Image (cartoon, rainbow, N blue to C red):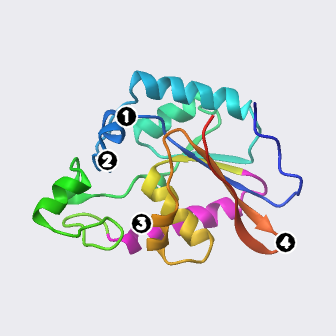
Amino acid sequence: MPIMPSPNSDPEIWLIRHGETEWSLSGQHTGRTDLPLTAAGVREAEELGRYLAKRPFALVLTSPLQRAHETCNLAGYGGVAQIEPDLCEWDYGAYEGRTSAQIQESVPGWTIWTSPVPQGETIQQVAARASRVIERAAKAGGHVALFAHGHLLRILTACWLGLPPDAGRFFALGTASVSVLGYERETRVIARWNVLP
């Protein structure tokens, strides 16, 4: 069943995480490695298209990484989407391609949310990119769709709510999920979260 429009007219930001990849399935940190979707990920992206039912957006932005861009295309928005480099996933530096469990073998207690990322981005740098995306979305004059990545979208949500970026740890996101950021009166809120088609 397609998602119905919000009953109010306040602009919303629709967060759409890319479909499954080999590394999202294995739990490996996938920052700038440009992996394609798996066959299951392709099916998830096509299902997103049926779920969104060609819902119109004032602006559609996608990460340039193929897993997000391909999800956008398969969901039916490739013809109107604009590439937004600020939507790239967190640069995991030396931890690219490793699972949290593997990293914790040499750095006990390590988490992406609270620990340094050697040769990668700080969480503050990711939050700065997310904040720029929010600023761009605010100027669109209507609802905006963002096709991007799990950690980036979770940090963007924290920024939207005025929380510190590490509060993104509370907002789990499945692959090919849809979430909506909006308003309740003048207060920024999460209108829907982690909806799976």
Q: Which mark is residue 21?
A: 1
| Residue at screen point 22% across, 58% down | 93
Most frequent secondary structure within the magenta stretch: helix
- Circle on res. 185: 4
Q: Secondary structure at mark 4?
A: loop
Tell me which segment is drawn in magenta: 122-143
Image: 36 above or below 15 = above
Amino acid carrying label 2: it is Thr
The residue where tag 2 is placed is 30
Q: What residue would you read off at disc 3? A: 126
Q: Is residue 151 above or below residue 124?
A: above
Going from the N terminus, do you reach mark 3 or mark 1 first? 1
Who's the residue at 32% across and 33% down the image?
A: 22
Report which quarter residue 115 is drawn in. Answer: bottom left
The quarter of the rendered structure image containing the N terminus is top right
Q: Nearer the viewer, mark 3 or mark 4?
A: 4
- Disc 4 marks a residue whose amino acid type is Arg
Residue extending farthest left:
106
Residue 33 at x, y = what percent? 28, 43
* Pointer 1 or 2: first along the chain: 1
Q: Is residue 159 above or below residue 73?
A: below
Tell me the element at label 3. Answer: helix
Give, as a three-letter code, the residue at label 3: Val
In space, the residues marked 1 and 4 are separated at their CA atoms by: 38 Å
**Mark closer to the chain start, 3 or 4:** 3
Measured Cα–Cα span from mark 2 to mark 3: 14 Å
**First along the sequence among labels 2 and 3:** 2
